[in-house]
């Protein structure tokens, strides 16, 4: 965190737990695959219309990874861009955290594959699984390692190849998701962009709302499980919608309360990019004006753990976020999980 800013805004952890070592987001980077799948293309695949998808979700197109492009490839590209912006070499990274629900394989971790691909041979590497909330969970984990002085440089990546677990014959879900990755480098670097707080939450009693039942120890792959389409993402859209609005509101309020910041002072709110109607409802409940809210889901759909990371990178690149601006990230996903983070850019 910028030393000057600590006087203006409360960094709860810095003041109470870790004797003042703060955590900065030194840089962000993102990558989306080249191939674009438009709503008009989906009209030819399932019984849907561009009008339905646009009006019910706000999504116009999404990116789809190539057949030989995997989550670790997408993640490595976003990570390399973040490293370049931070003027760091891969071998300076101490720890890699990859948030994903679409790992290349159940094991080894996608983080280990990314370590090899970018050449971060000194880094510890592991995956976390918090669905669409994964990037904020990753920021919170990374922040602890920086603030406790365990590590100096942490790479947090949210990366997904959701197209691999989408049932392309199910119109309820196939119109919603896309592929992509976003990455952030965390360090203690006074004068850089301060991560003031990150908070997380979960409710396992609602795990059934959004899941992929097949492939784990409960339902290993068999010809029956494949025939029953158990290896695809399943979602109760209506219930998920209601829970998303409440959870994102709660997370946003908690993160602002911790930092003693009023929503009016936030320059840019970056909510999880799942559905335009969820974004509007959350914006209204937290008292944000429409011009404060950053939206790019029309171009990418829901990229799960990558969503807010890609949006943060784009918001910075297009000048919506300037040095010193306060940014609020809000996420929600399967688990159920949720979280929020406040950054002083
Ligand atoms: N095209 C046309 N019709 C469709 C389509 C489609 N692509 N998909 C569903 N429908 C139909 C349904 O069959 C249903 O028809 P019926 O009423 O005859 O049964 C009807 O549309 C449902 O319409 P609505 O109730 O108006 O749909 P809703 O407003 O609930 O929107 C949606 C559905 C977009 C899925 C919404 O519920 C949603 O966004 N949910 C939240 C998703 C989310 O936030 N996920 C975040 C976490 S993701 C993660 O963690 C990986």
Image (cartoon, rainbow, N blue to C red):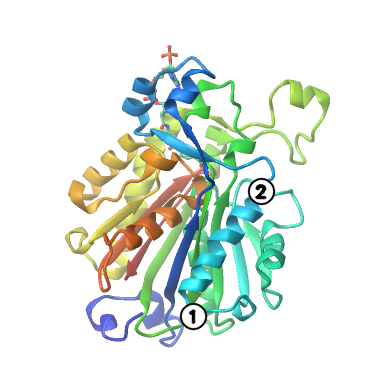
**Residue at 31% over, 86% down:** 3
Q: Nearer the viewer, residue 304 or 323?
A: 323
- Tag 1, which secondary structure? helix
* Image coords of residue 321 (percent x, y): 28, 63
Which image quadrant: the N terminus?
bottom left
**Mark toward the viewer: 2 or 1:** 2
**Residue at 58% over, 40% down:** 162
* Image coords of residue 249 (percent x, y): 32, 48
**Ligand 1 quadrant in view:** top left
Q: Which mark is residue 70?
A: 2
Q: Is residue 141 above or below residue 294?
A: below
Q: Quadrant of residue 278?
A: top left
Are there few (<14), some (14-19), or many (20+) residues within 10 Å of tag 2? many
Q: Residue furthest right?
A: 222
The answer to whether mark 2 and mark 1 are in CB contact below 8 A is no
* Image coords of residue 284 (percent x, y): 22, 43
Q: Which mark is residue 147?
A: 1
Q: Earlier in the sequence, mark 2 or mark 1?
A: 2
**Residue at 67% over, 75% down:** 123
Q: Nearer the viewer, residue 246 or 182?
A: 182
Q: Quadrant of residue 124?
A: bottom right
- Tag 2, which secondary structure? loop
Q: Distance of mark 2 from mark 1, alpha carbons?
A: 32 Å
Q: Nearer the viewer, residue 184 or 146?
A: 184
């Amino acid at each position: 965190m910028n030393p000057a800013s600590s006087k203006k805004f409360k960094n709860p952890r810095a003041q109470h737990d870790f004797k003042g070592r703060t955590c900065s987001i030194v840089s962000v980077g993102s990558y989306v695959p080249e191939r674009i799948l438009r709503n008009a293309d989906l009209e030819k695949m399932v019984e849907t219309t561009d009008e339905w998808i646009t009006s019910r979700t706000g999504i116009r197109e999404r990116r789809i990874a190539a057949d030989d492009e995997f989550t670790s490839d997408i993640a490595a590209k976003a990570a390399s861009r973040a490293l370049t912006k931070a003027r760091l070499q891969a071998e300076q990274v101490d720890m890699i955290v990859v948030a994903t629900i679409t790992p290349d394989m159940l094991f080894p971790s996608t983080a280990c594959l990314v370590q090899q691909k970018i050449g971060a041979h000194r880094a510890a590497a592991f995956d976390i699984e918090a669905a669409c909330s994964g990037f904020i969970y990753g920021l919170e984990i990374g922040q602890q390692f920086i603030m406790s002085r365990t590590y100096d440089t942490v790479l947090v990546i949210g990366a997904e190849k959701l197209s691999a677990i989408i049932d392309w014959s199910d119109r309820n879900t196939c119109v919603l998701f896309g592929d992509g990755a976003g990455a952030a480098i965390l360090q203690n670097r006074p004068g850089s962009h301060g991560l003031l707080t990150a908070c997380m939450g979960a409710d396992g009693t609602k795990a059934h709302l959004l899941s992929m039942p097949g492939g784990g120890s409960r339902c290993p792959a068999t010809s029956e499980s494949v025939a029953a389409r158990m290896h695809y993402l399943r979602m109760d859209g209506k219930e998920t919608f209601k829970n998303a609005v409440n959870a994102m509101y709660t997370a946003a309020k908690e993160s602002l309360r911790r930092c003693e910041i009023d929503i009016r002072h936030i320059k840019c709110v970056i909510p999880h990019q799942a559905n335009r109607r969820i974004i509007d409802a959350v914006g209204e409940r937290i008292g944000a004006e429409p011009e404060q809210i950053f939206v790019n889901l029309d171009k990418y759909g829901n990229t799960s753990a990558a969503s807010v990371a890609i949006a943060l990178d784009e918001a910075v690149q297009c000048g919506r976020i300037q040095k010193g601006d306060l940014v609020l990230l809000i996420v929600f996903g399967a688990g159920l999980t949720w979280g929020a983070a406040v950054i002083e850019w």
